[in-house]
Amino acid sequence: METQNGLVIVHTGNGKGKTTAAIGLAIRAWGDGFRVLILQFIKGNLQYGEIKTIETLREVDGRIELRRLGKGFQRNLKDKTEHIKACREALQIAREALESNKYDMIILDEINYAVKFDLINLDDVKELLHHRPDNVHVVLTGREARQEIMDLADLVTEMKLIKHPYQKGIKAQKGIEF
């Protein structure tokens, strides 16, 4: 299925739901016949409910794919070498996917974190967005999206934290946070 006007969409903010919203878009797009690729820049090998869903949908007809390319969340690491390498490889895979004409939507999950933590260069992300095909939707997720990325976007949504169960000492729950 060919899209008329591919959009650049950013989900950012300190609230929960950025990846969840992007996965929702992916499922909607898949349901409408789109070919969808989800590239995860940070998340490691933990099992999340959405991964099982995407794998199930992929078995139906192969039009949706999720690739887990990150090394996990990496706050306060002294040696970021492995993370930098993984994120740069993910960015190259994103370039190749955009050039391949195989996808109608490409989700760059947690790419804003990769920029924030200096795992990839902001200019490389801007170049990627500038050179994307006009008919491909690109979704970028993660907190603290840089203003330059939001300026290039057609749609920006900020998830704002109002209240979270973690603030009451309630741990992350399966089916809700993962």
Image (spheres, rainbow, N blue to C red):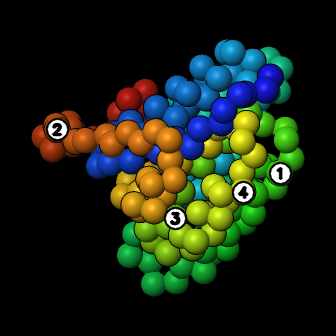
Q: Is residue 94 left or right of residue 169?
A: right
Q: Is residue 177 left or right of residue 83?
A: left
- State how far apart marks 3 and 4 are (Cα): 20 Å
- State how far apart marks 2 and 1 are (Cα): 40 Å
* Upstream in sequence: badge 2 or badge 4: 4
Q: Which residue is mark 4?
A: 131
Q: In what quadrant of the picture does the N terminus appear?
A: top right
Q: Name the residue type under label 3.
A: Ala
Q: Nearer the viewer, mark 3 or mark 1?
A: 1
Name the residue at 75% across, 18% down.
33
Residue 99 bears which disc, if any? Answer: 1
Name the residue at 63% across, 69% down.
124
- State how far apart marks 2 and 3 are (Cα): 25 Å
Q: Are marks 2 and 4 in contact (CB under 8 Å)?
A: no
Q: Position of residue 69 (x, y in %)?
A: 67, 56
Name the residue at 41% across, 62% down.
146
Q: Position of residue 113 (x, y in %)?
A: 46, 61
Q: In what quadrant of the picture does the C terminus appear?
A: top left
Q: Name the residue type under label 2.
A: Ile
Q: Position of residue 84 (x, y in %)?
A: 60, 74
Q: Secondary structure at mark 1?
A: helix
Residue 162 bears which disc, if any? Answer: 2
- State how far apart marks 2 and 4 are (Cα): 37 Å
Q: Secondary structure at mark 4?
A: loop
Q: Which residue is mark 3?
A: 114
* Upstream in sequence: badge 2 or badge 3: 3
